[in-house]
Image (spheres, rainbow, N blue to C red):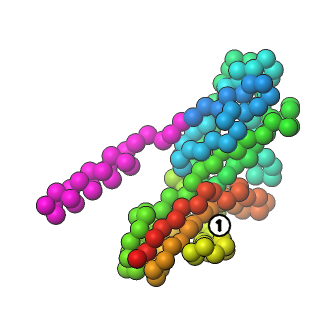
Amino acid sequence: MRRFLVASAVLALVILTALPAQATTVSVADFAFTPQSQTIAQGGTVSWHNNGPSVHTSTQDSPLSLWNSGNIAVNSTTSSITLPAAGVYKYHCAIHTFMTGSVKIPIKVSPGSGIASTTFTITLASATQSGFTYDVQRKVGSGSFTTWRTGVTARTVTFRGSSGTYSFRSRLHKTSNGATSNYSPAKTITIS
């Protein structure tokens, strides 16, 4: 029975890691991005399709400025952008600046629970990005988020703790100018 459980767990891990990255398209119409806030997995892609009667853009807010689609003509779709790192990326239409949106990319933590001897792996990005580091915050129990690690260059970090609940979130940090994304949606682990 134990061998069956181990084999099942390994097979599930292989299937989960072989899944293709998520791709999504945001609609641009009636002077709004729909959905206004889109959540995708690390390494997922986003494109914008203009369904409205006016030309628009998808321009990531400065000073991070990761993308600028240029003009999106009526009934056309932008090239996809890939966002490998956890964070919240705000953007706007450069022509109609009141049009805003965001792409949220959660942090990953595995496993979701364990005991004091469990080593948890916190995945900050699906791929390395030259010129960027990651900042990680941690919250213990119902406390507030505090800085846990800054300037992380690896895509993953590990954590071991005593019993309780811990939440983690991270952001992308551009080393050339100090610009950052907003912090990612948090993931919580429980240690018994």
Is residue 93 in sight in this rendering?
yes
Residue 3 on the magenta span: yes
| Left or right: where 104 falls relative to 177 | left
Residue at x-position 40% and y-position 64%: 111
Magenta span: 1-23
Compared to residue 32, the image places residue 148 above or below, namely: below
Q: Position of residue 127 (x, y in %)?
A: 53, 53
Is residue 149 in sight in this rendering?
no
Residue at x-position 37% and y-position 79%: 117
Quadrant the C terminus occupies: bottom left
Residue at x-position 86% and y-position 32%: 96
Magenta segment, prevailing SS (helix, strand or loop)? helix
Q: Position of residue 93 (x, y in %)?
A: 80, 35
Helix, strand or loop at disc 1? strand
* Identity, as a three-letter code, of the amino acid under mark 1: Asp
Q: Position of residue 21 (x, y in %)?
A: 48, 41
Residue at x-position 56% and y-position 44%: 40
Quadrant the N terminus occupies: bottom left
Residue situated furthest front in the rendering: 142
Observer-nearest of 38 and 136:
38
> In which image quadrant can residue 58 be found?
top right
Q: Which residue is mark 1?
A: 135
Residue situated furthest left in the rendering: 1
